[in-house]
Amino acid sequence: MIYMDYNATTPIDKEVAREMEPYLQDHFGNPSSTYQYGVKTKNAIEKARVQVATLIGCQPSEIVFTSGETESNNFAIKGAVFKNKDRGNHIITTQIEHPAVLEVCKYLEKYGFKVSYVPVDEFGMVSVSDVKKEITSKTILISIMHANNEVGTVQPIKEISKLAKEYRVIMHSDAAQSAGKIPTEINNLEVDLLSMSGHKFYGPKGIGALYIHQGLKLEKLMHGAGQEQGRRAGTENVLEIVGLGKACEIARRDLEKNLSHTKKLRDDLYVGLSKKIKNIRLIGHPEKRLPNTLSLSFLRLKTNKFLSEINKYITVSAGAACHSGEVKASYVLKAMNISPKWTKGALRFSTGKMTTADEIDKSVKILSDNILKFIN
């Protein structure tokens, strides 16, 4: 089976697995302990914190470890608005955010917060001017993803961050799909909060990180003891923190190589399928999108039936894998105003650093043969 769904999750890098292995059994101490066992694991956590900080170009003290992207987003959004509710009650986000942002915003509406869901254009791109129109004297937070998980469109986060600073609004970005794939340095994005997920770039599942700009105060999401500088209670997940740190180190080291590799194979897949199939449409921005992400729609193809057949050979997704149980059209494609005749045949392919040119060649043949069967 050919794996072509790296946006859903990635396999753990062998270097990452080797780095984690000693912490399965040998180094089991509680990091809060002052004796040797605890010192060993505490040092491992701080090393990982440096590795994560180095990837995004921030201070290690600005990194908090979490259980993953969902917790990071919850902590960032809830923490920011509850801490600043005396300043206002208005949040700005977009219609195409991951549920880990949209559901948090819906929850907050129950507690008196007002949320503006900014639209996107036909490429899935947010307009800076549209964001500006929504800012009021009550706005306290803007939360916009760096890159969309379904179509790969990369948003103008730096420009929106500058706008946020102008109006003294906190800026958060969900970087689950961009961290480790494209440059995500804080000095370029200029965000106050940035969420990351380990399993999206060859680290383990169940671990993430949240960048919190120095001096920014958040209401606590987890209450208990004083771990993570008093910002996130609970005994640290040393094993996976070590894995996340190593994954960040490798991602930084191999960023340009992996970017080039995944982009070439993504483009080869698109060119190959375009030669075989006439009624095909690229969804998402043609240039400003993740190098590994290819969202395509095939006219007259019904993806729910097609996937049950094709996933025996190639793993692809009919939209975001986190909620792919739904057969109805993706809310992202609806927000982009994609015609229903195209949304029915939409598929997402995402390449990774383990993808090979031979797999792309085989995928073109398997996909084109089967798609033609289903649409003819």
Image (spheres, rainbow, N blue to C red):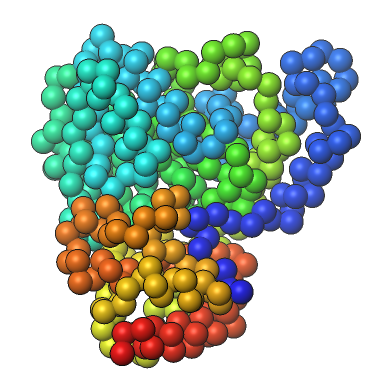
Give the image location of residue 314, x and y in percent.
53, 74
Residue closest to the eye, 103 or 176: 103
Q: Residue, x 19% and y 41% (percent of image)?
A: 118
Asked if residue 264 can be seen in this view, the reply is no
Q: Residue, x 43% and y 33% (percent of image)?
A: 73
Give the image location of residue 326, x and y in percent.
36, 55
Q: Which residue lies furthest to the left in this view?
A: 133
**Residue 131, quarter of the rendered image:** top left
**Residue 41, quarter of the rendered image:** top right
Give the left or right position of residue 342, taking residue 152 as reference.
left
Residue closest to the eye, 274 or 312: 312
Residue closest to the eye, 252 or 233: 233
Give the image location of residue 74, x and y in percent.
42, 29
Q: Residue, x 79% and y 49% (percent of image)?
A: 18
Image quarter of the C terminus: bottom left
Give the image location of residue 177, x and y in percent.
45, 50
Is 17 drawn above or below residue 108 in the view shown?
A: below
Asked if residue 318 can be seen in this view, the reply is yes
Image quarter of the N terminus: bottom right
Q: Residue, x 79% and y 14% (percent of image)?
A: 33
Is 353 drawn above or below residue 323 in the view shown?
A: below
Is 42 drawn above or below residue 312 in the view shown?
A: above
